[in-house]
Image (cartoon, helix red, strand yellow):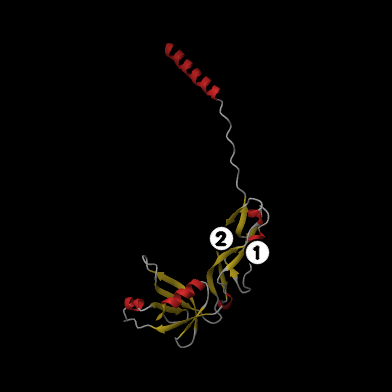
């Protein structure tokens, strides 16, 4: 899925509040070989792409001369309204690998949960990948239908990842697993007669000590 966003060089003397009121989002683009440049994009278009791509998909910025492949490095929102108020784009060089944390999407139904009473435990929720921008996935699917038995696990090595991807964790790291709920031990019944005997014995001992 190709994501394209039109941008324009922004006049830094312009009032950013006025820009936002006009539906424009102030932003900046920079990179290893890209001079930091103030730009602006359509806020609604940015919101649409952000919902689709988040911070883990390559976006092509147009309108700045040559098209630039970028990642959304940071999106700042208003603390009260939650509306986007600024965005940072990181320009990717051709041939440069990028490192991004890609979220997991858990799909399917686990037979171990459905039929055997197991409990699904999600150990990880995202995975840091280093790969070529063209291979960067928006998300990584974790098929929990593979969890059939009560001791089954899904490890990083079981995931379908891009060929150019390198991961920052051990391939034996567990992503999801099935655990079994421990049954509560029944408390042993209390012999009330023994409690009564102990109390009476204690009183008798106290009386004997007082009489001495």
Q: Nearer the viewer, residue 52 or 157?
A: 52
Extreme residue toward the top, this view: 212
Residue for badge 2: 124
Residue for badge 1: 158
Which numbered disc covers residue 8?
Answer: none
Q: Is residue 127 above or below residue 120?
A: below
Residue 100 is left or right of residue 38, and the answer is right
Secondary structure beneath label 2: loop
State which quadrant residue 6 falls in. bottom left
State which quadrant residue 182 falls in. top right
Extreme residue toward the right, this view: 149
Instruction: Give x and y (percent) for residue 90.
Output: 47, 77
Instruction: Give x and y (percent) for residue 111.
Output: 66, 56
Q: Quadrant of the C terminus?
A: top left
Q: Earlier in the sequence, mark 1 or mark 2?
A: 2
C-alpha gap between disc 1 and disc 2: 14 Å
Label 2: few (<14), some (14–19) or many (≥20) C-alpha neighbours in 10 Å: some
Q: Quadrant of the N terminus?
A: bottom right
The reply to whether residue 200 is visible in this rendering is yes
Task: Tell me which residue sits at (47%, 74%) in the image.
Answer: 48
Instruction: Give x and y (percent) for residue 210.
Output: 42, 14
Instruction: Give x and y (percent) for residue 144.
Output: 63, 60
Secondary structure beneath label 1: helix
């Amino acid at each position: 899925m190709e994501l394209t966003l039109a941008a324009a060089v922004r006049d830094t003397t312009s009032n950013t509040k006025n820009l936002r009121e006009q539906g424009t989002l102030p932003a900046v683009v920079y990179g290893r070989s890209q001079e930091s440049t103030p730009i602006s994009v359509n806020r609604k278009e940015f919101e649409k792409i952000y919902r689709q791509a988040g911070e883990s998909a390559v976006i092509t910025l147009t309108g700045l001369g040559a098209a630039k492949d970028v990642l959304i490095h940071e999106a700042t929102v208003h603390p009260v309204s939650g509306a986007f108020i600024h965005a940072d784009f990181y320009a990717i060089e051709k041939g440069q690998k990028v490192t991004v944390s890609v979220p997991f999407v858990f799909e399917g139904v686990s037979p171990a949960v459905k039929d055997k009473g197991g409990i699904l435990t999600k150990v990880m929720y995202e995975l840091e990948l280093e790969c070529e921008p063209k291979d960067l996935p928006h998300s990584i699917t974790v098929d929990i239908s593979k969890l059939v038995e009560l001791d089954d696990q899904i490890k990083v090595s079981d995931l379908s990842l891009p060929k150019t991807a390198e991961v920052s964790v051990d391939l034996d790291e567990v992503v999801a697993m099935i655990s079994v709920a421990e049954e509560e031990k029944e408390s042993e019944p209390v012999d009330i007669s023994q409690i009564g005997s102990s109390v009476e014995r204690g009183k008798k001992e106290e009386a004997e000590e007082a009489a001495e």
